[in-house]
Image: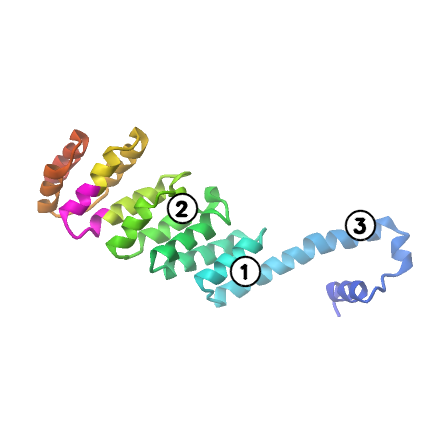
Amino acid sequence: MNASEDIIYLLKNGQLPENILKDHKRVVGISFFITNELETIFNQALDSAVEDCHLSISESSNLTDKLGNTSKKFDIQLIKCAVQDSETFDDVLESFTIGLHHRSPKMYTDVVAEELAKKNLPNDVWLKILNRPDSWYFRTFNQIETIVIIKALETAPNPETIAGVVNNYSKMTSYSFNILIYALRQTTLSHKTWEEVKKLSNRKEVKKECDEKLNQ
């Protein structure tokens, strides 16, 4: 057996030698090994296992909810898989929970946003994400909200749906409205659609952005 197996055996069987207790340095050394070395070994095993194990969104959510202090590599793998597997509003919401609630938004917002930008979801899903009354996933950073706005506009079935999003944002705070304007600049629509959106929009700032798109 190796050193870690020896320690585990002694502890499990209550056979820790008395002479170890009489030497505080040895006791502290064992404690340090358990809390540091074994944790490192465990995290390395997690990193290796997650590369070959595809968990469901629910399984990833349960794991990240109950298990903390995992490596960034481990967290990113679970977050990426969860967003990639998301097909419904509930899926996306649970993926957001994994990356932005169970884990630090400061560390993983970019990861969530990057994967979300690759998604091809129906317009109704994007609108549900955008219009959820408690859209807590938009509170910290702008990346995710910007992507959701763009996706909601680019997958819209008609100009009226786009104008509905735009005019709803026109009623919000100037901060939220500025996020909309930024998203509009990155949105790709047909020439005809931009013309219709311009006609249906309530704010001159939006009309100006439509003109910019029409003149490109």
Q: Which residues are magenta?
A: 153-164
Q: Residue lying at the far front in this picture: please name it.
A: 133
Identity of the amino acid at label 2? Asp
| Residue named by callout 2 | 110
Between the residue at mark 3 and the residue at mark 1, the CA separation in whole angstroms equals 28 Å
Which residue is labeled 1 in the image? 47
Residue located 69% across and 55% down the image: 37
Q: Earlier in the sequence, mark 3 or mark 2?
A: 3
Question: SS of the residue at dot 1?
Answer: helix
> Can you tell which mark lies on residue 100?
none
Q: Quadrant of the N terminus?
A: bottom right
Q: Name the amino acid type tagged 3.
A: Val
Q: Are circles 1 and 2 on residues that touch, CB within 8 Å?
A: no
Q: Going 44% across and 55% down the picture, which residue do you hit?
A: 79
- Vertical arrangement, residue 156 with respect to residue 41, above or below: above
Q: Which residue is mark 3?
A: 28
Q: Main secondary structure of the magenta part?
A: helix
- Indicate the amino acid at tag 1: Asp
Q: Secondary structure at mark 3?
A: helix
Magenta stretch contains residue 156: yes
Point out residue 174 in the picture as x, y percentages from the top left corner: 29, 29
Q: Quadrant of residue 204?
A: top left
Taking the image as drawn, is residue 10 in sight? yes
